[in-house]
Amino acid sequence: MKQILYNLFEHKYLGREEARDILQNITLGKYNDAQIASLITVFLMRNISVEELTGFRDALLEMRVPVNLSEYGPIDIVGTGGDGKNTFNISTAACFTVAGAGYSVVKHGNYGATSVSGASNVMEMHGVKFTADNDHLRRSMDACNIAYLHAPLFNPALKAVAPIRKALAVRTFFNMLGPLVNPVIPKYQLLGVYNLPLLRLYSYTFQENNTQFAVVHSLDGYDEISLTSEFKVATSDSEKLYTPEDLGMFRCKESDLYGGETPEEAAKIFDRVLEGTASSAQINSVVANAAFGIQIMSPEKKMEECIGIARESIESGKALATFKKFLEINS
């Protein structure tokens, strides 16, 4: 590791195989915490390359606990985290909104490393018991169109570095990897990123993997469609800039999306969204992200129709009923 670090400090890049081997060695315990922290720091000081990101991804997927849910043709909706905005769990709420509308979702998530509440925090706050049992996950899909995969159960590397990530409390390249290593390898993906270089990096990576995707970034720094500013959406076909007004929605303020100081506060906002009693700004942000997820799966539908489907999922109570059924099966 010493020579690897020297090379990186001299602004050299890792090849795909080299990156793969390094991440496998982390999992095998061949490096100490200080070395891993130093490696992580390198990627805070410069952008990660497609080769490096793909190599790290290769290692994680090779070592993953496999899950076979591919026949459902599911989507994952996730943000990289690391945007420093501490929003409530918008992506997770969007997942239940999409599932409530009848689409299959396999949500891959973890505890918050740079925010108060990650997806696993809000799940745990509701009594969800995480599992890697394939039959149980399949029952969840059959009953309510959604299964939740707590990342450390499916990837030993993510578990190995969790204490270091928590201690550093800054975004790391593991934030970048999380959305790429859903063990189901879902057919569809809506991914939010915190800057434009990452939007293009993930676009290139997804195109290599033949994933049907949309990568989104709000220009004021959110790793999701926040409706606080213009936002860019990249797919395999195009890259387009939208405004909240393009979706028929008003712009909201950063404070409208704040997730609170504790996981309990974030969980209460999450509940109010699915109950339809949250603020218009909170509900709209979830509807917007869910709508783009629906359009990835149903590209023949216009955005106006996808927004209507997502909003109806919440207003009709379908999203909430889906979540309650999910809790019944997974708690």
Image: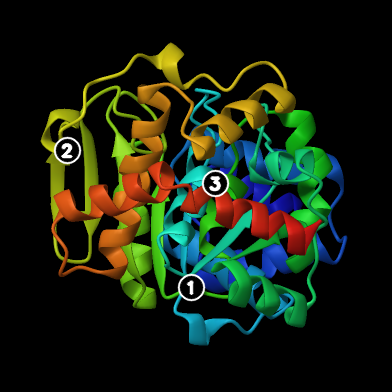
Q: Nearer the viewer, residue 134 or 17?
A: 134
Nearer the N terminus, badge 3 or badge 1? Answer: 3
**What is the crowding at mark 3: few (fewer than 14 residues within 10 Å), some, or many (at least 20)?**
many
Quick check: 299 above or below 40? below
Q: Which mark is residue 108?
A: none
Nearer the N terminus, badge 2 or badge 1? Answer: 1
Residue at position x 47%, y 70% from top? 104
> What colouring style does the render use?
rainbow
Quadrant (top left/top right/bottom left/bottom right) for the N terminus: bottom right
Q: Which residue is mark 3?
A: 92
Number of marks drawn: 3
Q: Quadrant of residue 119?
A: top right
Residue at position x 54%, y 46% from top? 92
Q: Amino acid at mark 3?
A: Thr
Quadrant (top left/top right/bottom left/bottom right) for the C terminus: bottom right
Q: Please, what secondary structure does the residue beneath circle 2 have? A: helix
Q: Quadrant of residue 29?
A: bottom right
* Residue found at the far front of this picture: 316
Q: Which residue is mark 2?
A: 247
Q: Please, what secondary structure does the residue beneath circle 1 have? A: loop
Q: Amino acid at mark 2?
A: Leu
Q: Which residue is mark 1?
A: 186
